[in-house]
Amino acid sequence: MKQVIHDLIEQVLLNLQQSGQLPADLKLAIQVTPSKEPSQGDFASNIALMLAKLADKPARELANLIVAKLSGHDAIDKVEVAGPGFINFFVTSGTSHSVVHQILQQGEDYGRSDLGKGDRIQVEFVSANPTGPLHVGHGRGAAYGATLANLLAYVGFDVQREYYVNDAGRQMDILATSTWLRYLELCGVEIPFPSNGYQGDYVWDIAATIHRENGERFQRSNDQVMDKVFADAPEGDKEKHIDDLIANAKTLLGEADYRIVFDLVLNTLVDVIRSDLHAFGVDFDEWFSERSLADAGQVESAIQRLTDNGHMYQKDGAWWFRSTDFGDEKDRVVKRDNGQTTYFASDIAYHMNKFERGFDRVINIWGADHHGYITRVKASLSALGYDADRLEIQLVQFANLYENGARISMSTRSGEFVTLRQLREDVGLDAARFFYVMRKADQHMDFDLDLAREQSSDNPVYYLQYAHARICSVKRQCDQKGLSLSLQEANLNRLENSHEQQLIKQLSLYPERVQDAAMRREPHIVVNYLRDLANQFHSWYNAHQFIVDDVELRDARIALASAIRQVLQNGLNLMGVSAPEKM
């Protein structure tokens, strides 16, 4: 209906331009929005207010001119000019009621569209370093990314979901060495554990696996391990200390044995992450290895391409990317004076790889602490010859966990954190997924464990699911009474009270809200819509009986309730939340 009104206004404005009543060069940015008050109609447009100055006419005069030229349409009952120049459209009741039959016919496809026209979009999200199990901080990015990908696919994009495995960086070396040191303890070799090492229980578990499978093959003495190692904090430097331990681990074990330890640590944790995400309702089409970029020569290829394009220079033995030419605050090192490439070099190669795979648009979902990284990555794409605007960065704020009114402190390095698995097992998958997407992703979020556990109307996901279950209960009661329902043939003109009119209008907005959420990358728009729909339904349910003696009215009300149930289910599915039939 919104599009019908848009097209009617557009035709009038074009006719007014052709007749000379409006300037020919006016840009027609027509906005049609649902009215908030029934007295103001079903839809409204502020086009007259927007064009008044450019058309050199008072807004109300222009609005009356537009209304006078509007051609009739069966779906529109009347059109009024209100206030300083708003145009209000009243839709015929039969037209508005038709959405109920449309929903019942389309079922789970109601709200789907071909807006994306099959354009290929890659959504890369989570991508946490495999240095431990996923914690609750990662959960928000996982829920947001998965829901956004679902929305984009729902409106017609060809979506690929990807996890970038950081398996080639210093953090993985720290973890591998930390695990080896725990392994040495199991062998009876006592070595002071580095303050900058990974200390979680999972490190002990992996070390025990290495010991069980390899015996004392990787055992070395305390003197060998600590040879020429810089002192640890607080007397020394914890960074130099851990780097020296890593260097000794690689030398003492040799390339082959160090790789055995490293890969066992990596593969164990990637498997844990993959399993936890699957249980969280999140699966990926591609798990992309950072290490594969170097192995395939793509890092060197990207550097060479930047060099050939004149965007690299050498200084103090290192190679620098001229990112300041593209708006960055300073140039960036891509290859150190020792010949080793930087994290940034891998990121350049990774994004080059993404666009070489033919995606029309790439969406990276990063933690908010990566905000300063955006400019340099986009700069590298421009320098490589790509349109940097095809890369979107969506930032997700960390989620703070609260219980009994107090914030739960967490530290990944010390191993003191609540895992995503623990959260899911505690509050349930539905509450976890729903709570994470209730707010705009770039806003701070406080995750209230006590509220998430509640089985009451105070819990927003419970309240929403309860609406779905209530409708299923009505259908079961009809079955138990042996009532024969004719929902597709129901006389919807019997839906006359204000609750019903409001609900029908709300149902008609669902496709638009889904499209808005997808295109604005804001899943919480659908959350807010569903909460409003559930609230309106509960008010209606509490005020009116559905199973009444008047068969025509009964079928009309249950048809409307069934349409509400379908939309609730469709929206919950997008968020990875179940729609229970009983509660």
Image (cartoon, grey):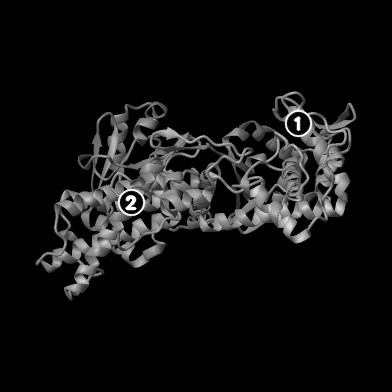
Q: Which amino acid does label 1 sit on?
A: Glu
Relative placement, left or right, of 253 versus 87 is right
Give the CA separation, mark 1 to mark 2.
Answer: 48 Å
Q: Where is residue 181 in the image (x, y as percent from the top left)?
A: 75, 44
Q: Name the residue under label 1.
A: 239
| Image position of 336 (left or right of 482) | right
Front position in the image: 427 or 98: 427
Q: How crowded is mark 1: few (under 14 residues within 10 Å), some or many (20 or more)?
A: some
Q: Left or right? Give the position of 582 relative to 193.
A: left
The residue beneath circle 2 is 462
Q: Is residue 228 visible?
A: yes
SS at mark 1 in the image = helix
Asked whether, in this view, residue 319 is left or right of residue 141, the answer is: right
Residue 284 position (above or below residue 23): below
Which amino acid, by three-letter code, is at mark 2? Answer: Tyr
Residue 491 visible somewhere in the drawing? no
Q: Quadrant of the C terminus?
A: bottom left
Q: Which mark is residue 164?
A: none
Q: Which residue lies furthest to the front in this view?
A: 188
Of 430 and 298, which appears nearest the observer? Answer: 430
Closer to the camera, 191 or 375?
Answer: 191
